[in-house]
Amino acid sequence: MFLQQQKPVDVTDEVQTVLTEITEDVFFNCNVRYEYTSVPIISMTELSHEMFLPSDKNDAILEVDGMQLHVNKSFLSYHSDFFSTLFSSNFKEGQMEVHNLSKDCVSKWHHKSVPKLLELADRFMIPSVIHHVEYHLLHYTKIVNENLMWMADRYGMDLLLEKMINELENVARARKLKASSDYMKLSDKIKAKILDKVMTII
């Protein structure tokens, strides 16, 4: 029996051939099946212009890279403890400032922007963003496993962490993880889980 393998495919390419190789030992008379998951790619540029225009529903203004964004305080407060504090009646002007965001980080979804998205979600205390990123990483990503494991540990993405540990199906992969710079950044709790996994394969 061999583990599931993923092959990312960019469906925007009109003509392409998709090839993959199963590296585990495979015997004849085995059953093979495949599944596919479509990941929507949405351009946020047009949406942002409409969402952040002045309206009766928006009652606050945030400044991002010099742009004024009209937002709804109740909506942001519901999704973020940071903004809940920022907009609370006890908040005093000057006591806390809104961090300056790069508009590229909030208008583009790309595997290279994942670390920054997680950092911002953690800084502004928006767990829903972390959940969305985790779902994306579970189904489609070009990020190496070692880096994924660290991000899962750092930002509490338990499903992704479980998947990464389960993919340590041989000693070679465990050694590759141990040799990576991300391994030293893992918590002791996760290192213990990795050790438990390694003990089952040696």
Image (cartoon, rainbow, N blue to C red):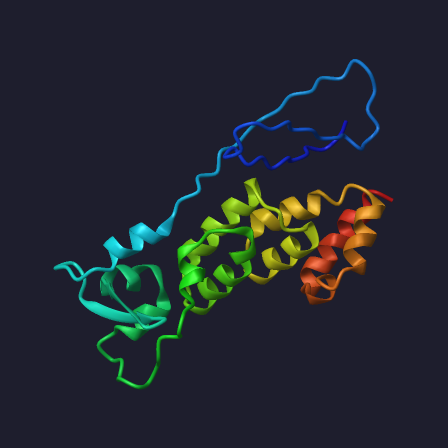
**Is 119 above or below relative to 161?**
below
Q: Is residue 127 left or right of residue 33?
A: left
Quadrant the C terminus occupies: top right
Task: Name the residue furthest right.
Answer: 202
Q: Is residue 1 left or right of residue 150?
A: right
**Is 147 above or below relative to 13?**
below
Q: Position of residue 37 (x, y in %)?
A: 52, 32
Q: Residue at x 70, y 43 (%)?
A: 166
Tally the numbered discs.
0
Could one spot residue 156 in this view of the protein? Answer: no
Task: Name the residue furthest top.
Answer: 29
Q: Position of residue 89 (x, y in %)?
A: 22, 77
Could one spot residue 101 in this view of the protein? Answer: yes
Q: Nearer the viewer, residue 138 or 9?
A: 9
Quadrant the N terminus occupies: top right
**Is 13 above or below relative to 175?**
above
Q: Is residue 55 left or right of residue 35?
A: left
Q: Quadrant of residue 90 in the image? A: bottom left
Q: Residue at x 36, y 63 (%)?
A: 80
**Is 180 above or below relative to 158?**
below
Q: Position of residue 33 (x, y in %)?
A: 64, 21
Q: Quadrant of residue 8 in the image? A: top right
Q: Position of residue 172 (x, y in %)?
A: 84, 47
Task: Name the residue furthest front.
Answer: 15
Q: Residue at x 57, y 51 (%)?
A: 158
